[in-house]
Image (tube, grey):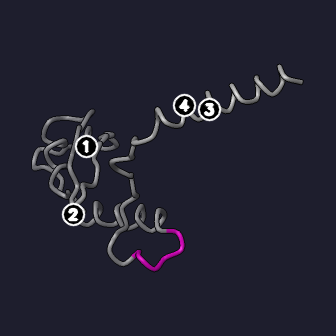
Amino acid sequence: MKNFMFMLFFSALSFSSFAQETKGNTVSSKEVAPVWPGCEEKSEKNNCFNVMLAQHIQQNFHYPKDYSEKDKGTKLIVEFLINKNGEPEIKKISEGRKSLQDAAKKPF
């Protein structure tokens, strides 16, 4: 029984020392999904955001002057994030010709 109490005490002591080692660690930032203006009251904010983003791109994307039939169906991958001020920051655009990539930057 003494051995069991010693093991229990030692285990509790080691757990408390572990907790002390992690004390002071704080989370400095938390990722929060962006909310499109007008989607604040919606129950499915992410879905609303995606729909509004797609509409924005459709309305604001302008094909470059050298766009041709062979460009039809070209896939562009635009990697971006929304910063703390709610503004998009393009990180990378891949695939497609340079003029299509440049055109993809303008809706943002």
Q: Which residue is mark 4?
A: 17
**Cα gap from disc 3 to disc 2, whole angstroms:** 57 Å
Q: Nearer the viewer, mark 4 or mark 2?
A: 4
Q: Which residue is mark 1?
A: 69
Q: Residue 15 at what x, y percent from top left?
A: 62, 32
First reached walking from the N terminus: tag 3 or tag 2: 3
Mark 2 residue element: helix
**Cα gap from disc 2 to disc 1, whole angstroms:** 20 Å
Q: Nearer the viewer, mark 1 or mark 3?
A: 3
**Cα gap from disc 1 to disc 4, whole angstroms:** 68 Å
Who is closer to the viewer here, 88 or 95? 88
Who is closer to the viewer here, 9 or 38? 9
Left or right, residue 76 beside residue 99: right
Toward the top, the furthest residue is 3
Residue 38 belongs to the span the image colors magenta: no
**Cα gap from disc 4 to disc 3, whole angstroms:** 5 Å
Residue 42 belongs to the span the image colors magenta: yes
Q: Are marks 4 and 3 in contact (CB under 8 Å)?
A: yes
Image point 21% across, 62% down: which residue? Answer: 85
Left or right, residue 42 beside residue 53: right
Mark 1 residue element: helix
First reached walking from the N terminus: tag 1 or tag 3: 3
Q: Which residue is mark 3?
A: 15
Tell me the crowding category of disc 3: few under 14, some 14 to 19, or many 20 or more residues within 10 angstroms, Cα based.
few
The residue type indicated by label 2 comes to: Asn
Give the extent of the magenta segment: 39-44
**Cα gap from disc 4 to disc 2, whole angstroms:** 57 Å
Q: Which mark is drawn over residue 60?
A: 2
Q: Residue 78 at what x, y percent from top left?
A: 28, 43
Toward the left, the furthest residue is 65
First reached walking from the N terminus: tag 1 or tag 4: 4
First reached walking from the N terminus: tag 4 or tag 2: 4
